[in-house]
């Protein structure tokens, strides 16, 4: 269970509920509480809001999945901002990761002469 304070974020001042990052593992399934604040960074470096949907999961691709697919699927860089008039925010992540001793190398199907 992740808890984010109701203190308003100010990206210009470096204040975030949770700063920009990607998840280490394969896939993250995220159930949120209905409060806004989750953002995803696009390839053009712009941020977009991910509106909460009741009963829906957010699925983030992790660094390990990007490595296994040789960059075919990119890791999701994301952050959390608390709105100016915000509530405390909770989310429930499930991090799916390989076994500690799993061999991590690019999948053959994701390799080519060009990549």
Image (spheres, helix red, strand yellow):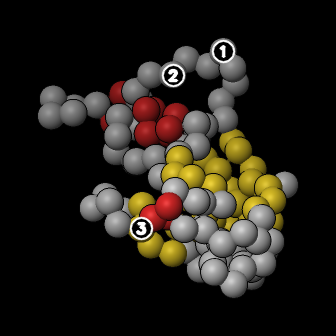
Q: Nearer the viewer, residue 107 or 74?
A: 74
Give whichever of discs 1 and 3 has the lower sequence position.
3
Image spot of residue 40 (x, y percent): 48, 63
In this picture, residue 50 sits left or right of residue 52: left
Above or below 103: residue 22:
below
- Residue 25's disc is none
In front of the other: label 1 or label 3?
A: 3
In this picture, residue 93 sits left or right of residue 45: right
Q: Nearer the viewer, residue 109 or 95?
A: 95
Above or below 91: residue 95:
above
Helix, strand or loop at label 3? It is: strand
Helix, strand or loop at label 1? It is: loop
Specify the quadrant of the image occupied by residue 25.
top right
Q: Which residue is mark 1?
A: 101
Q: Which residue is mark 3?
A: 47
Above or below 102: residue 52:
below
Q: Nearer the viewer, residue 18 or 74?
A: 18
In this picture, residue 26 sits left or right of residue 29: left
């Amino acid at each position: 269970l992740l808890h984010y304070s109701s203190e308003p974020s100010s990206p210009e001042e470096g204040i975030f509920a949770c700063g920009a990052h990607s998840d280490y593992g394969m896939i993250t399934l995220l159930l949120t509480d209905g409060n806004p604040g989750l953002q995803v960074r696009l390839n053009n470096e712009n941020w977009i809001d991910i509106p909460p949907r009741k009963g829906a999961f957010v699925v983030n691709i992790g660094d390990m999945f990007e490595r296994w697919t040789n960059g075919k699927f990119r890791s999701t860089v994301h952050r959390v901002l608390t709105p100016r008039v915000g509530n405390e925010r909770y989310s429930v992540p499930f991090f799916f990761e390989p076994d500690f001793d799993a061999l991590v190398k690019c999948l053959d199907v994701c390799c080519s002469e060009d990549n």
